[in-house]
């Protein structure tokens, strides 16, 4: 039985955050979830967790929570993880993915948090570096990756300057039940499922030959939650996810099969994105005993069964696009 600690999970009503909160509760931890419900849902919050609706950009609220709860650990999973769109929503991206993170780091230093666990992204690596290895010098090519890498650097200097321990995870293309199916800018598995459920053509940018490694949420959530009890993980960076990369075309075939229905494929103009993105996972396997358990076909089958039981919502455009120049037309409306 693990010692009972007070743990803050930001984004705990969202996708990865809610699963990590579940795992922490299984470990006997006292979990407080902070989420503004901009991308998550109250139904995702574990009933054994205390839920606080609020934003990581609300400094007054953050300071109040830390003062009242004296958190032992912080798991920061609140983010708007739309890499391609981040070029066009720079202020929103940096406010939510960088400035909000700094608010949490400041409070963690001031209230002597034992360890700050942060979910970064393989977006920090940039193009042309596969397989992506933690020792590589990051060269992010989008605003989302820049924001994530900036937070990583802030955590490093906060450890050196103030002794704030941290663990950084760089997951990639995580999928599974509880994903927000109505967000058309991220989570391609969810986008495909939603489009098929509405009898719409699925949309693929370019020829669909770009490769990604799709990781089931249940393969990573317990590893992230348990990391705070592994001293060797402190102040380290970990790629985390599957080793098996597939093309987007192959992914589309698997989703059609699992849904038991096939719609037309609409190939859109290729967008500016990394063509091949997959990582090396030796470090997380050696230190945190990570292993793949759920293959892609099995995971998609499970996700589609969940999706068929939830309300289908029309996919809506992002409300506050800041730059229209070079914005893919399909990101304004569906044709």
Image (tube, rainbow, N blue to C red):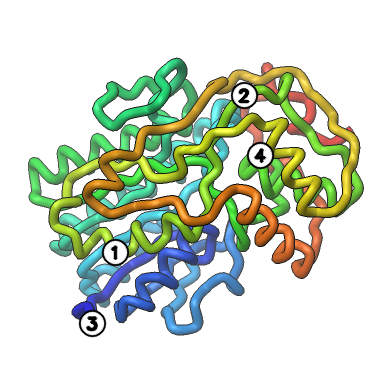
Q: Residue at x 60, y 66 (%)?
A: 41
Q: Earlier in the sequence, mark 4 or mark 3?
A: 3
What is the crowding at mark 3: few (fewer than 14 residues within 10 Å), some, or many (at least 20)? few
Q: Say above or below: 187 vs 303.
A: above
**Image position, residue 99 (x, y; %):** 37, 43
Q: Secondary structure at mark 2?
A: loop
Q: Earlier in the sequence, mark 1 or mark 3?
A: 3
Q: Of residues 265 and 147, which is closer to you in this image? A: 265
- Which label sits in the foreground, 4 or 2? 2
Marks 1/3 in contact by CB < 8 Å: the verdict is: no
Q: Earlier in the sequence, mark 3 or mark 2?
A: 3
Q: Which mark is residue 226?
A: 1
Q: Which mark is residue 1?
A: 3
Quadrant assignment for the C terminus? top right
Q: Of residues 14 and 101, which is closer to you in this image? A: 14
- How far apart are the two marked residues, 4 and 3, measured between alpha carbons? 41 Å
Q: Secondary structure at mark 1?
A: helix
Q: Of residues 257 and 172, which is closer to you in this image? A: 257
Instruction: State the residue position of label 4.
Output: 185
Q: Say above or below: 47 vs 89.
A: below
Q: Quadrant of residue 267?
A: top right
Q: Earlier in the sequence, mark 1 or mark 2?
A: 2
């Amino acid at each position: 039985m693990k010692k009972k600690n007070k743990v803050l999970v930001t984004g705990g009503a969202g996708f990865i955050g809610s699963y990590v909160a579940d795992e922490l509760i299984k470990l006997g931890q006292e979990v407080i979830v902070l989420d503004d419900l901009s991308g998550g849902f109250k139904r995702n919050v574990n009933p054994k967790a205390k839920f606080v609706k609020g934003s990581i950009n609300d400094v007054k609220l953050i300071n109040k929570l830390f003062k009242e709860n004296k958190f032992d650990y912080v798991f920061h999973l609140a983010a708007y993880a739309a890499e391609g769109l981040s070029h066009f929503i720079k202020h929103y991206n940096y406010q939510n993915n960088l400035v909000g993170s700094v608010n949490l780091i400041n409070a963690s230093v001031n209230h002597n948090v034992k360890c700050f666990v942060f979910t970064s992204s393989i977006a920090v690596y940039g193009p042309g570096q596969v397989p992506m290895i933690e020792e590589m010098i990051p060269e992010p090519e989008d605003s989302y990756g820049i924001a994530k890498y900036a937070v990583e650097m802030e955590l490093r200097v906060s450890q050196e300057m103030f002794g704030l321990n941290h663990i950084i995870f760089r997951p990639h293309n995580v999928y599974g039940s509880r994903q927000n199916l109505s967000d058309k800018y991220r989570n391609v598995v969810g986008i495909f499922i939603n489009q098929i459920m509405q009898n719409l053509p699925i949309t693929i940018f370019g020829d669909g030959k770009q490769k990604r490694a799709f990781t089931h949420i249940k393969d990573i959530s317990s590893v992230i939650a348990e990391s705070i009890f592994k001293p060797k993980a402190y102040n380290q960076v970990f790629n985390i996810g599957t080793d098996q990369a597939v093309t987007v075309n192959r992914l589309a075939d698997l989703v059609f099969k699992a849904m038991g229905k096939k719609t037309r494929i609409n190939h859109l103009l290729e967008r500016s994105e990394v063509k091949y993105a997959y990582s090396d996972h030796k470090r997380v396997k050696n230190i945190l005993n990570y292993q793949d358990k759920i293959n892609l076909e099995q995971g998609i089958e499970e996700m589609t069964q969940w999706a068929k039981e939830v309300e289908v919502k029309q996919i809506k455009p992002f409300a506050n696009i800041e730059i229209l120049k070079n914005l893919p037309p399909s990101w304004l409306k569906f044709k």
